[in-house]
Image (cartoon, helix red, strand yellow):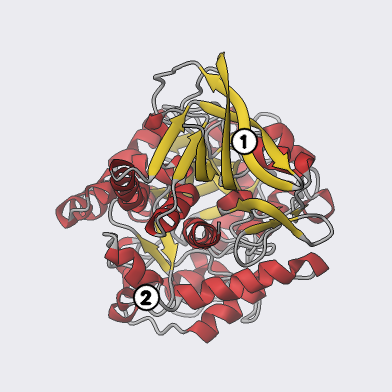
Amino acid sequence: MNETDIIIVGAGLAGLAAALEATRRGRRVLIVDQEGEQSLGGQAFWSLGGLFMVNTPEQRRMGIRDSHALAQLDWMGSAGFDRPEDAYPRQWANAYLDYAAGAMRADLAAIGMRWFPVVGWAERGGSLADGHGNSVPRFHITWGAGEGVIAPYVRLAHEAEAAGLLRFAFRHRVTGLEITNGRVTGVQGDMLATDQARRGASTNRDVAGEFAFSADSVIITTGGIGGNFARVRAQWPTDRLGPAPKHMIAGVPDYVDGAMAAIAEQAGAATINEDRMWHYTEGLSNWDPIWPHHGIRVLPGPSSLWFDALGQRMEAPCLPGFDTLATLKRILSTGHAHGWFILTQKIIEKEFALSGSEQNPDLVSGRWSQVLKERLGKGATRAVEAFKQHGEDFIVADDLNTLVTGMNALTPETPLDPLHLRAQIEARDAQLANPFAKDAQIIAMRQARAYRGDRLIRTAKPHRILDPLAGPLIAVRLNILTRKSLGGLHTDLTSQVLRPDGTAFDGLFAAGEAAGFGGGGYHGYNALEGTFLGGCIFSGRAAGRAA
């Protein structure tokens, strides 16, 4: 049977969310994906499972006073919408805020999601009140991490499959859209040979046949471009950030290549804001990689000292966990694509977390006993200690001179002056002599510890970096980690794809990262975290209701 009501291209979170809404309407759905069944759920599987929600019971229990108005101030100050084509992205942002402060938590709880009780404080901003950043903690980590986010959708998809409303066509790579009288009426492409590679690993592109499927509507949910370095560099905003880095590592599998959005554009769809993108500055080369150039992001607490490639300590708002885009620009201004954390064993034990479900088995387990054992036991988490032991980006030493010798051996093209580093670290350490300070990072550390969630599991007790009792010293080389596309296919509030003249492209819808998480870029220039998974769910929901 090659005819159905709706074809969804992409079996990730946005696609599954769209399928749920469509099958609830009694629509017959076919999900097509070039990867195998083992990759069902897409990129979301690898995430930490954080969701941006507003004024939740979890926030209130932690003493956080949040509101729709405050969240909107933060979002719009971060987005910086400034283009005529931002009209729909701005509407999408407002609609998502209404959902995040309204029905979102209840809707997701109804299908089985639960959240870790300590709300995380991501992207803290560090500049002015009406600028970028979250004024309060809003990062709700789902029990089960990324696996816990996709699990309810996978379960409901299989239920719809059993009911005869949903079919999957794995290892089907779409190469074109079928268009009849200006309307998208199906897809065509190549059937790929079976490949049992583990989830996320590269799979073969051996063509075993061809296919064509027809439908009333097609929804594109194939993600962004983070696995395609050539496309990232081609779309890089040189005018805003400087030249694209020569060296990057990948935060997503190589199938996240932007190919399907390009196919839609060639067929007549409009794309906007493709120069807006979200890449992390705290990337580690994975010592046990799954996909090519596999990188893992450090989720840092506020205490590590951050130096650029030339050995200059970075100033606010370029502090750990505060302003990703400003920090990216600051790092690249040196002409190099890396920076350094210098910290102590006490800091790494309390403050280092790694993004991704595979790096957080305690959260994946959904058991408090496992979390307490991992987060509050002796030493850092097992995943962090493994990176410290095996990762190519880590240097450990008992004194600063030996540490810097190791750092220079790792990056001989940018030799660091140990005397200059020592002077900066000693100046910082001197700020801890009394409760007063002018150092922005010291002030930020003290504010973080005023939030009991940070004090409990995320922030080390302030101490001198050069205190031997806090050692050994640790240096971590940080790389640029590709991740999210903030622009994409231009859509209206129903996820209907638009043509370049602003008219509807009949029969074609898009959701998730392929659509800039809504409208062609509902983040604007900056993201507040937790808004990627949330955007996939919200835009997929809209597409499934309208297609």
Visible residue check, residue 476: no
* Element carrying mark 1: strand
Identify the residue shown where x is 47% and y is 54%.
Answer: 18
Mark toward the start of the polypeptide (1 vs 2): 1
**Which of these two is toward me, 135 or 100?**
100
Q: Position of residue 451 (x, y in %)?
A: 37, 75
The C terminus: image quadrant = bottom right
Q: Report crowding for label 2: few under 14, some 14 to 19, many 20 or more residues within 10 A (C-alpha).
A: some
Amino acid type, label 1 = Val
Amino acid type, label 2 = Tyr
Identify the residue shown where x is 69% and y is 49%.
Answer: 331
Identify the residue shown where x is 43% and y is 62%.
Answer: 51
Q: How many numbered tags mark residues here? A: 2
Q: Nearer the viewer, mark 1 or mark 2?
A: 1
- As drawn, is 127 to the left or to the right of 433? right
Mark seen at residue 325: none
